[in-house]
Amino acid sequence: MTTREFDGIRLEKVREHVWEIPREGGMNVPARVLASEQLLEAIADDKTLQQLRNATHLPGIVEPAICMPDGHQGYGFPVGGVGAIDAEVGCISPGAIGYDINCGVRMVRTDLTYDDVRGREDELVEALFEAVPSGLGGGGVITGTADAIDGALERGVEWAVEAGYGIESDCTNCEDGGRRPDARPEFVSQKAKDRGRNQMGSLGSGNHFLEVQRVTDVFRPDVAEAYGLAADGIVVLIHCGSRGLGHQTCNDYLRRIEQTHGDLLAELPDKELAAAPAGSDLAEEYYGAMGACINFAWVNRQLITHRTREVFGEVFDADPIDDLGMTLLYDVAHNIGKKETHEVGVGPDGLPAVGNAVVDRTERDLYVHRKGATRAFPAGHEDVPAAYREVGQPVIIPGSMGAGSYVLRGGAASMDVSFGSTAHGAGRLMSRTQAKREFQGGDVRRELRDGQAIHVKAQSGATIAEEAPGVYKDVDEVVRVSDDLGIGDKVVRTFPVCNIKG
DNA sequence: ATGTAC
């Protein structure tokens, strides 16, 4: 058997791209890293493996805890981690979902081709940068009244469409129809709502961006056709989250859970994994508040979509929907926790079990924590919109601004291998501080423009340095692993044309 | 990621 050891953590190679940390000590379940040898080296470079092993101590976690090929260190729980935890006898952990609740990405199609945009990149990038708020702090597409905040938190994209910021298919072509049914806005603090009020429709900072891209490669023509994507076609990628509102909510509940459930906390190897036991008041309140933040992030991306359509309409002097075909392909959450039903191994008592204790397999309700991981439901799954059900759910994986991105489709093996999940991006290779030492924003911007015809405009040069292509892992390698495993299959690859960011 | 600090 092939084994590897990093910092005292031993991994056994189960099969190609599947590495297992066997159950030992306080681990409730084994953990698995889904990675090629090359990506495993990068993953083992920071605390990711320790964090993955720590996560297996969470009560009620179901076999296995997973790290995706783009995994790296996060707050308590790896970015790129999937933790499926029993919703009756387990717990819910904000750190395993992430500070930026429903950080995610959507792709908007257009009927334009690269020839239509070529030579007009600067005009487009300036107009988008002017129209779409970005950077730290306040200022959104709209200033949220109390009614707008409540509508967004309660009803998500439905609210935005009714308020005139979208069309009906913006709901259907979004994960969960753009609305979490179990959202409970009353459990979001006033302080969080106040932070969100003037951020409705804003990109934020860090790795968040809006990118105009062209389709360069088509790997599965039948699926690409079902998705309305073709070579040379122009698409728009919008990557952002729930801004200060989600951040505040995560913080609010981490503090409350630490205070109220100190007994559970004391059993965990890392305070940052603080969790509320299933059935507790705080589990219900956090779950409802998180659902409301999910809706807010979807509204955020919807308002940016609305503004983007307006800009394209002006630049190309055409109706963005009727003439330019700017419909939503799909919108996926990258940081999310939700109740889903999955088949798991159970013991004689009908509760989740591991190894020799398993006597049967049955469906259980789980809190599926995806932190830097994308839902990737396969063809035939009832939660895939009707238009895509025969081919599988669109999965959108952004790479760096110099490398481009991928559209995948949920693979046939995803339910068996990864609780219906795959990777979410290229994954960082170095910290932001290290990136600023290695790169200079102006140089990066010039090289992208002169060398690759990629036009970038950002609020701050430091952000360009922090997000330089060289700070990311190889997105092609991440996607290769997903495709090989059959959890998310390559459909098309895109390449950047214009990028705006905070 | 984040009014980069409870």
Image: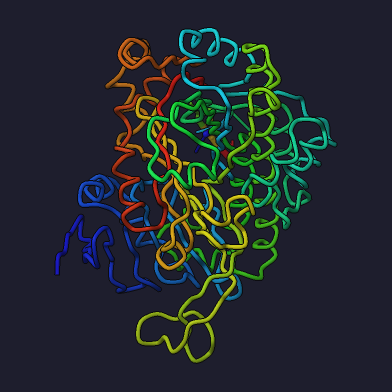
Image location of residue A10, percent across then percent down: 21, 63
Left or right: residue A461 compared with residue A102: left
**What's the image's color scheme?**
rainbow
* Quadrant position of residue A170: top right
Q: Nearer the viewer, residue A286 or A35?
A: A35
Choose between A193 and B4: the one closer to the eye.
A193
In the visual, does A59 lie left or right of A445?
right
Q: Residue at x 24, y 68 (%)?
A: A14
Q: Residue at x 82, y 33 (%)?
A: A163
Rendered-image quadrant of the N terminus of chain A? bottom left
Provide residue A197's location: percent of width, then percent of height. 74, 31
Residue A317 percent coordinates (x, y): 67, 11
Q: How many marks?
A: 0
Asked if residue A141 is positioned above or below residue A493 in the image, the reply reads above
Q: Is residue A313 above or below residue A20?
A: above
Location of residue A332 (image quadrant): top right
Farthest-out residue, bottom: A348
Q: Give A319 or A225, whichever is nearer the viewer.
A: A225
At horizontal 31% and vertical 73% (from top left) the residue drawn is A23
Image spot of residue A217 (x, y percent):
37, 34
Q: Is residue A461 left or right of residue A256?
A: left
Relative to A100, is A419 above or below?
Answer: below
For residue A25, what is the image quadrant?
Answer: bottom left
Check the image and name the residue furthest to the right: A147
Residue sitting nearer the eye, A257 or A78: A78
